[in-house]
Amino acid sequence: MGDSNAETHPYMLKKASARSAVDMIKASMKYMQDTGVVLNHQLYVSGYSQGGYNALALAESIEKGAISTVTLKGVAPMAGPYLLKPFGDAVLATGATMSVPAFMGYLADSYAYYNDNLTLDEMLLATQVPKFNGLFNGDNNATVIHTTLGLPLGAPSNMLFSDAFITSYETNATHKLKTMFDENTVGKWAATSKIKLIHCSNDDVIPVGMTVGVKAQLEGYGANSVEQLLITDVNNSNGDSIHSNCAKPAYTQAVGWFDAIRKGDI
């Protein structure tokens, strides 16, 4: 997290995710202008997993005027949890499990910190709350987080979240966390840029339905240039298409697509 490691990371928060990327782009452009690097002001945006979510958040922000001096040539989000409410619905349900519990803990920590009317105390088991102190400060990887929380991969959701909170979320159509998820869902605008959604066919962390669903959502809002690519195993045995292995082939596809746009082939 660099110099911001004393801050709580705004995990899966749409506006903050876009703003931080916009700030980085503006700073990079200023540096290049100050050092004599010639800019063509053409921008290509991509990211994997959380970065895929951030890529769509950034694209919307730019198209709505956050940076007026660039032309967004192509956007390639990859394997992102774009649709937060369906994602939350699948986890915060009676009998549900968490494929990677650290991700849900990270989300709970972020949403509790940045929303005044949501707390860890109301979401989590009382025994888990004290363990969150400093756990998501950027120093700990998923293995440390899982060990600290006592949660194996695929742990039941009620080993982290209280049964009362799960029931409340599950039965209340206007639950405040559902509202927050809806507000932070990306891909809800009439995009004019070229978008290529890339996902791995056997993703074991972020369901492929996230990509299929956000494509339909973007098109429903009026986006006119959205396509998707599902990456499968190279030889059906080495697991290239699971979440942890697919960033490299996904980025390879994204860069190739960007290059075709740059050359005018698309």
Image (cartoon, rainbow, N blue to C red):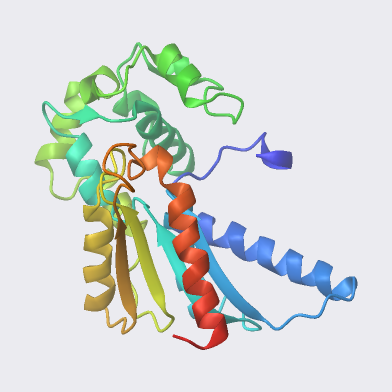
> Can I make out residue 57 in this image?
no
Above or below, 253 against 91 in this view is below
At a point 41% along the width and 46% down the height, the residue shown is 246
Q: Quadrant of the N terminus?
A: top right
Q: Position of residue 132 (x, y in %)?
A: 47, 21
The furthest residue to the bottom? 264
Question: Which of 22/175 is in front?
Answer: 22
Q: Nearer the viewer, residue 174 or 243?
A: 243
Q: Nearer the viewer, residue 211 or 185?
A: 211
Horizontal side of 112 relative to 125 (left or right) equals: right
* Residue that appears at 44% across and 81% down: 193
Please tell me how many numbered marks the rendered image carries. Answer: 0
Quadrant containing the C terminus is bottom left
Drawn side of residue 170 relative to residue 63, left or right: left
Residue 96: name its quadrant.
top left
Vertical placement of residue 167 versus 63, above or below: above
